[in-house]
Amino acid sequence: TQLLEQSPQFLSIQEGENLTVYCNSSSVFSSLQWYRQEPGEGPVLLVTVVTGGEVKKLKRLTFQFGDARKDSSLHITAAQPGDTGLYLCAGGNNRLAFGKGNQVVVIP
Amino acid sequence: EAGVAQSPRYKIIEKRQSVAFWCNPISGHATLYWYQQILGQGPKLLIQFQNNGVVDDSQLPKDRFSAERLKGVDSTLKIQPAKLEDSAVYLCASSFRGPGTEAFFGQGTRLTVV
């Protein structure tokens, strides 16, 4: 079983602050994806990381894949209220399994 | 390009009744997933199809849940009989590049069992 643990489960910050959330596993993944989900909607893909140590940037979001391809982090710089949502990591080894998510609330 | 279509959006049923959900994936996507998402948690994979064949159904409660994907396109997920703990959002997703790769989700069906 590919177990993905995300931490912290819930995070509330003020607009303009920075934050980092984590996704950890004991399994090695061929790829790892991050999604964001808003209430009443399905998850929307943000990024896929494939290579150990890879860093990808999406505007103010920075994603890093661990060297051993077992963990990942998401860093948001100068968070805005529009960043509020449930951030989900998912690992892909022939089946797409999700973590429980990081609920992020950005207060104006 | 049209996204993943699911229906209905909402469904309320009494326990022990049956219910069915429908999903139409993005055209050309061979991989189709059904997930169950309970409030406050991440999606839990129920079943995964590659074309019309089942790749993984290890977490599908087979005594009450069933799914099919005829002709490798549309899919239906059925629950019979429903229990209170089946109340959740049922998400369908599809993937072009194969199992474990980027998935595109529908809006989901919110099921309430009373």
Image: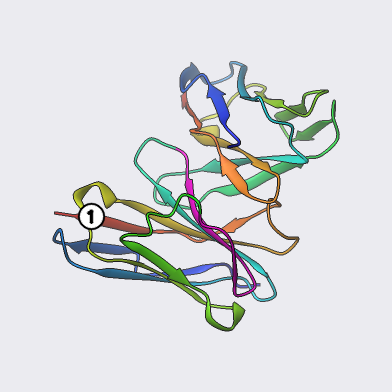
Residue A50, position in %: x, y?
81, 39
Q: Is residue B47 above or below residue B41?
A: below
Q: Which residues are magenta?
A: B42-57
Residue A55, position in %: x, y?
82, 29
**How packed is label 1: few (under 14 Cα within 10 Å), some, or many (20 or more)?**
some
Which sits in the foreground, B91 or A106? B91
Judge whether residue B82 is colored magenta: no
Which sits in the foreground, A26 or B31? A26
**SS assignment at label 1:** strand
Residue B23, position in %: x, y?
47, 71
Q: How is the image coloured?
A: rainbow
Q: Residue at x 38, y 59 (%)?
A: B62
Q: Which residue is mark 1?
A: B112
Quadrant of res A21: top right
Residue B19 placement, left or right of A97: left
Quadrant of res B93: bottom right
